[in-house]
């Protein structure tokens, strides 16, 4: 998903973390070598996990904040018929926030849990045209909050067309309710352009459990290494233990290095910066009680995934 908000599963279905696995729209179901041969197995299972540290960044109202995030995901792709594939996915994100100075009282949250489920169906209308639909349900809550009051739900629909083996374009639409807020309705342009044997522009192929629904420029050495630079938005809303809602929204720009240990196993390292950070606290009546922007901060991350 190019530069659009993620929800815990969205990062996986179109490229982001538990922010909802929306596994990738346009995802192929094969290993890199098999992709080049244009083959697709009847079933695959992917397990992924990762960690990102977002280092201290200042807050305009005074103080600073940092976050450590851990991710886990399981997704599968199963051929129902020659034209229909079923791709269930579940993703989890844990965020451990640390606030200092004045920000500590403005944003009274610490440990946030997000779980997202998104079973997707892909229907291949002909050789080049595919339609995808996925209902989404997500729970996002601070430790101690009422999980029964932490649900957000919606759906994702997309259509994509392969003009050639090198170029696929499409459009998706995400709709998702928000805690104490209006629903999100977001158009999502989809692109997978293989410029030549090594270079690709895509928002459909990113690390498993990656939290960013990102657009990337990728250089594939065609061997064990892959390099990429990308950027994407994140948005999170979660129920607080006191009954209100917290929000953390911003963008990330990063570089990525992938090492393929074997055909089924990969490790991804990531370094980058956050930007346009905004933190918000909303009381149970829906009134914003604090809203401040944050400075850019360094992020470092590592992800791993295995495919069966």
Image (cartoon, helix red, strand yellow):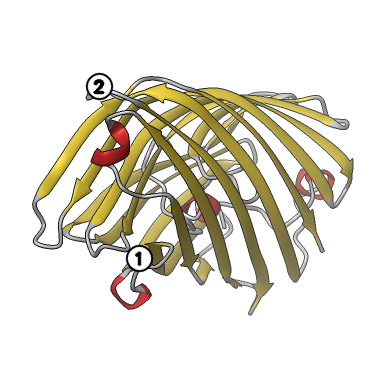
Q: State which mark lies toward you, 1 or 2.
A: 2
Q: Which mark is residue 89?
A: none
**Quarter of the image that includes the C terminus:** bottom right
Q: Position of residue 75 (x, y in %)?
A: 64, 65
Q: On the picture, is 132 further left or further right than 173?
A: right
Left or right: where 145 falls relative to 34: left
Q: In the rendering, at what x and y percent does residue 303 appear?
A: 70, 43
State the CA–CA distance, disc 1 to disc 2.
35 Å
Residue 267: x, y in percent? 78, 40
Query: Where 167 sits versus 128, above or below?
Result: above
Left or right, residue 45 beside residue 96: right
Image position of 197 with respect to 268: above or below: above
Cβ–Cβ below 8 Å for labels 1 and 2? no
Question: What is the x, y in percent for residue 37?
Answer: 81, 47
Q: Which residue is mark 1?
A: 155
Question: Which structural element holds mark 2?
Answer: loop
Q: Quadrant of the N terminus?
A: top left
Number of other residues with Cα within 10 Å of mark 2, as a class: few under 14, some 14 to 19, many 20 or more: some
Residue marked by disc 2: 60
Residue at left 49%, top 58%? Answer: 9
Is 92 drawn above or below residue 165 in the view shown? below
Q: Could you tell me which secondary element the residue under label 1 belongs to?
A: strand
Few, some or many C-alpha atoms within 10 Å of disc 1 (few <14, some 14-19, many ≥20)? many
Residue at 55 percent across and 45 percent down: it is 69
The earlier-in-sequence mark between 1 and 2 is: 2
Quarter residue 276 falls in: top left
Question: In this orientation, which residue lies closer to the viewer: 294 or 135?
Answer: 294
């Amino acid at each position: 998903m190019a530069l659009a908000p993620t929800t815990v599963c969205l990062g996986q279905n179109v490229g982001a973390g538990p922010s909802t696995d929306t596994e990738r729209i346009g995802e192929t179901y094969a290993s890199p070598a098999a992709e080049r041969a244009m083959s697709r197995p009847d079933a695959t299972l992917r397990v992924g996990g990762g960690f990102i540290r977002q280092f201290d960044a200042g807050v305009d109202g005074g103080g600073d904040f940092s976050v450590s995030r851990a991710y886990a995901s399981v997704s599968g792709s199963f051929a129902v018929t020659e034209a229909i594939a079923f791709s269930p996915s579940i993703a989890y994100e844990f965020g451990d926030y640390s606030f200092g100075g004045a920000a500590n009282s403005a944003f009274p949250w610490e440990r946030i849990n997000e779980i997202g489920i998104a079973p997707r169906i892909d229907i291949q209308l002909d050789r080049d045209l595919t339609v995808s639909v996925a209902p989404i349900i997500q729970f996002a809550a601070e430790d101690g909050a009422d999980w029964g009051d932490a649900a957000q739900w919606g759906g994702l629909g997309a259509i994509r067309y392969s003009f050639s083996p090198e170029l696929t374009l499409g459009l998706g639409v995400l709709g998702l309710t928000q805690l104490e807020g209006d629903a999100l309705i977001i158009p999502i342009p989809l692109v997978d352009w293989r410029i030549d044997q090594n270079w690709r522009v895509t928002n459909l192929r990113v690390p498993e459990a990656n939290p960013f629904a990102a657009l990337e420029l990728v250089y594939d050495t065609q061997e064990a290494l892959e390099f990429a630079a990308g950027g994407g938005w994140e948005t999170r809303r979660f129920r607080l233990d006191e009954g209100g809602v917290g929000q953390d929204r911003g963008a990330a720009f990063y570089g990525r290095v992938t090492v393929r240990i074997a055909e089924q196993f990969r490790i991804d390292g990531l370094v980058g910066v956050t930007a346009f950070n905004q933190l918000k606290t909303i009381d149970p009546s829906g009134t914003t009680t604090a809203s401040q922007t944050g400075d850019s901060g360094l992020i470092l991350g590592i992800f791993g995934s295995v495919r069966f």
